[in-house]
Amino acid sequence: MILVPIIAWMVGLHAVAVGQEKGFGLGVMIGEPTGISGKAWISQSRAIDAGMAWSFRRKGRFHLHVDHIWHFPQNLRSAERFVLYAGIGGRLAAGRGDGVFGLRIPLGVLWWPRGAPLDVFLELAPIVDLIQETELSANGGIGVRFFFP
């Protein structure tokens, strides 16, 4: 019976060792829109970021976005691990008889807490909707993701 807590502790240490620059993370985002956020690393500086959420603007819409993100860790010098990022992607939003498709340009900052398999992010994403009509808007919010080993 003592092996179960020891194995759980070792798995936890592995998760911390993996850190935030590898693997897959899942969490929540709060803002416009509010929902679930996921991130999968594809290299040391690039990741695919996705969100499935609810937009409270206007009539209310289901929102789905997928972005290709580039990270710039060398641009912020601090005792903590703060990282700037930028990307490009797309979004779909649908609700109450209409749907939109647009391009997103997410810009943000991450905080990677030392010794924890988390990232905390603050993001602003200008949007150019192309379908049904051309319109400029933005998404923004804060979130946190847990990274699995």
Image: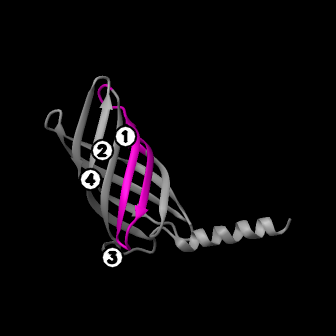
Image height of 12 relative to 34, above or below: below
| Badge 2 amino acid | Asn
The numbered dot on residue 61 is none
In the foreground, 131 or 81: 131
Residue 148: image quadrant is bottom right
Q: Mark 3 and 1 residues: CB-CB less than 8 Å, in contact? A: no
Instruction: Identify residue for label 3.
Output: 74
Q: Could you tell me residue 51's position as x and y percent? A: 39, 47
Residue 33 in percent (x, y) is at 37, 40
Q: Amino acid at mark 3?
A: Gln
Identify the image quadrant of the N terminus.
Answer: bottom right
**Kind of residue at disc 4:** Gly
* First of labels 2, 4 by sequence position: 4
Report if residue 50 lies within the magenta region.
yes
**Kind of element beneath mark 4:** strand
What residue is pinned by disc 4?
89
- Residue on which the image places disc 1: 33
Q: Which of disc 1 and disc 2 is earlier in sequence?
A: 1
| Sequence-first tag of 2 and 3 | 3
- 66 left or right of 21 in image: left
Q: Earlier in the sequence, mark 1 or mark 4?
A: 1
Question: Which labelled disc corresponds to residue 139?
Answer: 2
Q: Split into 4 quadrants, where in the image is the C terminus?
A: bottom right
- Alpha-carbon distance for marks 2 and 1? 7 Å
